[in-house]
Every structure is written in structure tokens, then in C-alpha cells.
Image: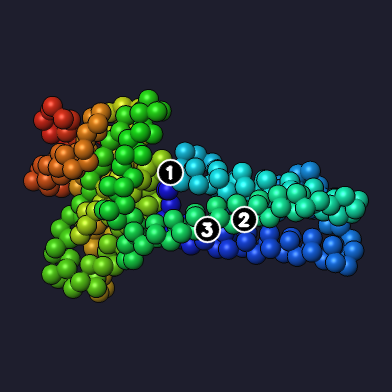
Amino acid sequence: MTFNIDDIDASLSALNAALKEHYLRGEKLLYLILFGDLTDHNIIDNDSHLHCQFCEWLTLRMRGDTLDRNMVLSISRNHDAMHNITRMLMQAVVSGTTTKELVSQYHGCQLAFIDSIETYRSSLSTFRNQHDTLTGLPLRHLLYQEYPSFLERCRRNLSEFYVLMLDIDRFKSINDTWGHNAGDEVLRLVASRLSSATRRSERLYRFGGEEFIILLETKGRMAAESAAERIRCNLSSYEIIISGQLVHITVTGGLTRVEAHEELHSVIARADNAMYYGKNNGRNCCVTVMADGEPSRISR
């Protein structure tokens, strides 16, 4: 999965609405059977699965290489199957050719659709609980869960995998000067700024304290360093007002390439070392270090 708390809540709402919408379709079918109501052409159309509002959500969720793609694919397949069997059953009712087998197939497709939605809804709820309530970002535990999938995706796409660790400069002085409420507000604003600076293929996490981690899928070192600088520079000119005072917020980053089959903890340790090299050499910069090399400050 590659979305934040707002996206999760929107998806949960879409899933709840889908269940309601398709229960209403079942109600129309029941009214047709019991009272001979007019058939709904949105149901008996061969492309009926494309007419319901839920199809729009499915289309959006199917775009890109999201980590929850298999669950969404399962819902999509069951959604299509349920529309097909509903159309067949409604046509059979109208023509008087209904069979027990057809009704049984309808029931089975309906249950499969509901089960696939419930499975995904449960996964989303668990996923939501692994996000930070302050910033809305995924937390460290989710980073470790998703790392293998991201690594495999980069391998499959013949891309290079980089990890960028960022730390807010002089954050302790903000807490000491204005208090922890001000510090929390800075964390929230920085997280929002980082979210707007990252692209769809880049995964942002709150690692802990004032540290953030971004997973980058790139075509090479130059592209990774360009992405790191793009993200850092988005904050380098960022100013906020705390208790009537203008405060300039910057971050320092450590960037490193993930080697084949490398454990995440060793990658993070290397990125952390690069980041603190930057802290000790002026801050407000990004530093690259490879597995077999020395730290090198990125220059624009």
C-alpha cells in the first residue's frame, strides 16, 4: 500500500458505499421476483460493472504498482463476476427460466465479493493503526514490513533502490525554546511538506523522533541524488511562525543504495552515518554514501 491516513479513510468509505450500493442491486432483483417490477437497464447491460460508482474507485486503485494490488485485483474480479451473474439472473427471472443452479451461483458470487471487500477492509484497518497519529505517516514497523516488497519491485523493474534518511536540524532547540507542543507542530508541518515533495513512487515514513525515511526507486545514483536534493530543497526555504517568531526549518539527509539481499537495518545504519556526516559539516544538505565508499556531499 502506498497511501496516507486520509487515503485509507477514503478507501474505507468507498468500500462501505460499495457494499451498500450492491445490496440495493440485490433489493431491486428481489422486487422484480416478488412484484414483477420493471428491470433496471443499468443492471442488465453487458457492461453494468462499469456503470456503478465503485468501478471508479477500482480504476483509480488499479493504477500503478501498489503493494496492495493483489487484494484490489481480487475485489475487481469478484465485482465483475457478481455483475455478470446478477444480469443473468435478472434476465432469467424476466424470461421465466430461473434455475436453482443460477440462484446458487448468484449467492456464491455475492459472498465472494463481500469476502474480498471484508478482507481488504480488515487489512486497511490494520494498516491504518500502523500510522502516526500526529503526522499521518506510516511508522517504522510498517517500513520493515514493506521493505521486502519494495526491494522486489525494484528488482523486477530493473531499478536501483535507495534509502534517504532525513533529520530536522536543531529540533531539540525548538523543543527547549518553545516547548513540546511547538515541536509537535513543527513535526506535523514538516511531514506535510515532505509528503507534498515526494512522488507517487517514493514512500515516506516517520522513523522516530524528528527522523524520516524515504524509499526511492531510481535509475541510478544521479537520479537518486537529484530526488534527495529536490526533497531537501522543498524544506530549505521553509519558514514557520512560532510564538510570533519566524523560524527557518531545514533538514539534513543521508542517502545510500540498497545492495542485493541487504537487510534494512544495515542500510539504515549506513544512511544514518551519512546523515550525521552532513550534520557535522554544515547541516541543510544531503550526503551520499555507498556500501564500499566514503561520504560525499551532494552538490547541485
Q: Nearer the viewer, mark 2 or mark 1?
A: 2
Choose between 108 and 197: the one closer to the eye.
Answer: 108
Specify the quadrant of the image occupied by residue 257.
top left
Alpha carbons under labels 2 and 1: distance apart = 25 Å
What amino acid is found at the position of numbered circle 3 in the picture? Glu
Rendered view: 178 above or below 32 = below
Please name the residue shown 30% across and 33% down the image: 161
Q: In this rendering, would 48 be left or right of 117?
A: right
Residue 84: give its label.
none
Q: In this rendering, would 149 be left or right of 80?
A: left
Please name the residue shown 46% across and 42% down the image: 66
Rendered view: 177 above or below 78 = below
Number of on-image labels:
3
Alpha carbons under labels 3 and 2: distance apart = 10 Å
Q: Nearer the viewer, mark 3 or mark 2?
A: 2
Q: Circle 1 sits on which residue?
A: 67
Locate residue 123, reporting x and y percent. 44, 55
Locate residue 261, reporting x and y percent. 24, 31
Please name the residue shown 17% across and 30% down the image: 290
Residue 111: give its label.
2
Residue 118: give its label.
3
Q: Secondary structure at mark 1?
A: loop
What amino acid is found at the position of numbered circle 1 in the picture? Leu
Q: In this rendering, would 214 be left or right of 21?
A: left
Alpha carbons under labels 1 and 3: distance apart = 18 Å
What amino acid is found at the position of numbered circle 2 in the picture? Leu
Locate residue 239, reporting x and y percent. 29, 59
Choose between 274 and 161: the one closer to the eye.
Answer: 161
